[in-house]
Image: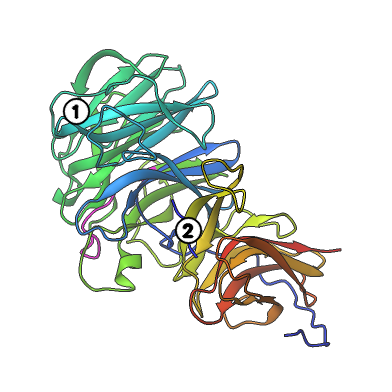
Amino acid sequence: MTNLFKKLGSLAIAFSSFASYCFADNPIIQTKYTADPAPLVYHDTVFLYTSHDEDGAFGFQMENWMLYTSTDMVNWTDRGIIAGVKEPYRTFAWADGHSAWAPQCIERKGKFYLYCPTIYQGKMAIGVAVSGSPYGPFIDVLGKPLIFRSNPGDYDPTVFIDEDGQAYLYWGGNGPCYYAKLNEDMVSLKGEIQVASIDFTGTPAEASYTEGPWLWKKNKYYYLAWASRCCPEGIGYAMSDSPVGPWKCKGTIMDPDVRSSGNHPGVIEYKGKTYVFGFNYNVLKRTMSKHYERRSICVEEIKYNADGTIQKHPWWSAKGVANVGTLNPFVKNEAETMSFSEGLKTEFATEWERNVPWDKGKKIADRLYVTSIHNGDYIKVQSVDFAEGAKTVEVSVASLYGGRIEFHIDKIDGPVVADINIVSSGEGDLWNTAKASVKDVKGIHDLYIVFKGEKDLFNFDWWQFSNK
């Protein structure tokens, strides 16, 4: 991708900690349109793999797969594109070069397997790409689809490894739900493809299976959730004593709602709680009333009844889930770590040695940063633990026109604890640091990073407080 282009008062005010029990903001990602959430818990971190609706999409226009991470369920860090269907991120050479649909990633013995539905010879197919890291890069190790039967319903894979080591792949849209066992290599099938047996007797029509299955286990029960009864879609689910069924539908985790034509569940256990991810269209609706396929991922906590059934949850709330951790401001924090934002985008670029032709120069760094910054835009970061206090704050920016960065606490127009003047460098891709003193702030606060100025202000790479 290409590059885009107060002095403080003398009175020190001490701000005390507010309650550390904060909530996420749904949708959890605002800088891009994201859908089809596939969360993976690995080494105390949630890795959220997503599909990506293009900014100009009218129907389904999806060209790559994205990754976001969190350790507190409220602040999410954009990790960029990890696979795709178009250059320079084309993962599957055999595919038609469009339609990066709902993925899922799983870890086995230190390798990560990303199952990706896309188009092959005009029909749906499921490929698998492998990496030694959850961050990628992911490589197509087969050079062909894992699933291809000229079946239009072969999409939306979910993968699950049982306690005995047997892995299962479920998938299917607009028809039955299919499944097959996987060999230990995770890139070949073990036995024949089967149709999942789901008993819908006595359950409402809005629980019926449409697409987007997700398989997991809790205590002694196996659960299969799916996007239900299109359209609109809710989230239905079934239970079984076996990972291959037969399944008994138990109703819906979330009923269909006219505010969102689609849905797609992803379920994890994390830090003692169960979370269900899906999507709505609320980021789109902040700017326009027409319906386009530009979706935004949400998350809610779900709870189980004594008999193992799941308590029905209302539609995606604006509040979201409670934090399960705090953020350390005394380490370098990427600007693309946020719980909510207004008006911003994230961008990736490679920085080359200056004043040298790009094909002869030395690569200095790859940067993922916040851009499209205008007056009044902001980043919200939740549950920032300033402990006994901060003295200074430093930022990395590339500025064409200059501007200011104000650091507010607790609310967007809350007390200003730091104010950094950003001087224009005359070039939008020349990175510099700027620093300012911090008014005495202690304890845990939400932090609002508010941008002020005219035109396209600057690009923003990272920020860090210091208590020295």
The residue at the point 15 percent across, 39 percent down is: 201
The vertical placement of 461 against 207, above or below, is below
Residues in magenta, as a range: 257-266
**Is 264 within the magenta?**
yes
Image vertical order of residue 259 relative to residue 174, above or below: below
Q: Position of residue 8 (x, y in %)?
A: 76, 84
Q: Can residue 19 be seen from the camera position used here? A: yes
What is the basis of the colouring in this image? Answer: rainbow
Q: Write down the quadrant of residue 118 in the picture.
A: top left
Q: Where does the image place residue 40, in percent across and percent down from the top left? A: 47, 38
Let me know if residue 165 is in the magenta part: no
Disc 2 residue crowd, few under 14, some 14–19, many 20+, Cα 10 Å: many
Which quadrant holds the C terminus? Answer: bottom right
Quadrant for residue 122, please give it.
top left
Judge whether residue 252 can be spotted in this image.
no
Secondary structure at numbered mark 1 = loop
Residue 12 left/right relative to 203:
right
Q: Is residue 259 above or below residue 102?
A: below
In front of the other: 136 or 276: 136
Question: Which residue bears the numbered disc 2?
Answer: 346
Residue 197 - label = 1
Direction from residue 99 to residue 450 in the image, left or right: right
How many numbered circles are shown?
2
Picture residue at 45% right of the left edge, 66% below the top: 319
Amino acid type of disc 1?
Answer: Ser
Secondary element at tag 2: strand
User: Looking at this view, is 144 or 158 the one in front?
Assistant: 144
Residue 316 x/y as whole percent: 36, 61
